[in-house]
Amino acid sequence: MLSVSYRSITMNKIEYLILYAALEQCETLKNVASDWQLPHTEVAIAANHLFQNGYILARLFSGKGKGINDVTLTMTQIQAHLDGKLPAIYYLTPKGGTKWEAVSNPDWNLFYTGRFGSNYDIETGLSEAEAISPSPELIENHLRVSGHLDGLVHIPETVIWSEIKPWQATYWKTLPKAYKVHYKYRSIKRSIDTNDPQEWELDKQIKKMFAEMQRWYTEPEFETTPPNPNDYAELNYYTLLNETSLQKAEYLILEFAVIFPTYSLGSVAYSKELSQIEIVIAADTLFQKGEIRAKVFADEYDFEGTPNVILTKAGIKDHLDGRIRASYYLTPSGGARWEEIAHPDWNKFFIVNFLGMFPYENGIFATQQETIEKLLALDKFILMRQHILGTESYEILEPWQVTYWKTLPRGYHLHCECKKNEWGYWSLNDDSPSELKESYEQATQWYEKAKKWYTNPFSDNA
């Protein structure tokens, strides 16, 4: 049972951001945490308060596009959603919308929505758009500035005005009346003459006017004092990791960085549906064993980073919450640990790199030349790009650094020119010759089997 006093933690900016993020469309709590670099624990506590008090509800997805609406998530469900294990979106109730209005004091007469880019006419170069607002003056101002700011110049003679009574401004808010303008516009490339002070001044004035037009509500101020961790020290709704869960999390962290050393631990959590606590405990174990190391970046402009960093549990948590920018990579002992678990057959290894994936050069790499020849023979069935006949040349790599931590005695690199594959599975239909369908089926079966060069002991098919 939770012994935490919610108000001792906050109404706080996190609660406000959860409401704000879903003002105009449904959202996920995971995106809220990611977009504003918020700790999952604090997002969960804030969301739980909003759910339990009827300010937000969720839609749960059960597969095949089906879902259940108007669900009040429990704390356990909220955390599962944040961990990527419970597909869901949330939305404001009318009560939640009113709560947001109470702190933001919106002027709905200044609210504006627009839609651009429909029905492009290749002959005239015109596209269609519409704008809706309770204020016709606001619409007119948007039409005036759009050409200067976005290069979208409306055609005056195409403008058609109409009224909407009532107008559903958002999914939870209805206004008595609004005006809608339908018009056509032309896209142009806009530029400012850097030698003309008048153009600079005009650009500045229009940007200022546009910024003022965007202010249809007030963003409230919140306490900046962070919550005291002791206030929710007893908040523990995670299931303790058993040995199998920990081993699986460790393996997935290792597997994710076998080929490329540029991933974040957050990427593992998101794609492999691991909770933060699973990542924190497993990554901490791997750091302490010397099987992974981190490269930490000072800021968004730091592209070199500081390598060979051992993150603490607190550092891993800060990294997952977005407060520390870092990637991780395997050490040689980490690579050896992965090999011990996955039993890779390096003789089956290959990389198709027609798209320039770092750190490999363009082309096809493989331990066996026969593998490359098979890929070339079937590329129109299985690859997004095809090689151009007559441009092939082989390079023998002795030794071959197959990954950043692994070197093999020999490998082969095929250099060739390539083109977009215009054939592919998408060109098959009911009228396609049966021989062609059979060739495609055989090619895809071979390709799927060829890609399985190691064993994941924790997969469902293991």
Image (cartoon, grey):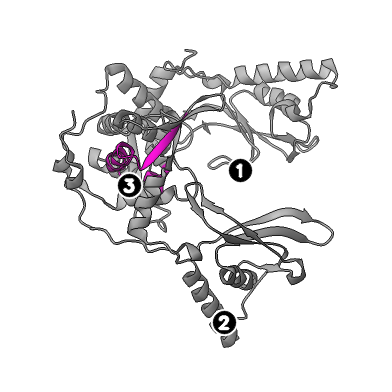
Relative to residue 448, is residue 109 depicted above or below?
A: below
Who comes first in sequence, dot 3 or dot 1?
3
Q: Amino acid at mark 1?
A: Gly
Residue at numbered disc 1: 356
| 3D distance between C-alphas at marks 3 and 2 | 39 Å
Which portion, as a residue range, is magenta?
31-60
Q: Amino acid at mark 2?
A: Leu
Could you tell whether 46 is left or right of 384 in the image? left
Place residue 419 in its image quadrant.
Answer: top right
Looking at the rendered structure, which numbered label has been put on residue 51? Answer: none
Label 1 CA crowd tier, 10 Å (few <14, some 14–19, many 20+)? few
Secondary structure found at label 3: loop
Relative to residue 433, is residue 276 depicted above or below?
A: below
Given residues 150 and 212, the one toward you in this image is: 212
Residue at numbered disc 3: 38
Label 3 CA crowd tier, 10 Å (few <14, some 14–19, many 20+)? some
Place residue 129 in its image quadrant.
Answer: bottom right
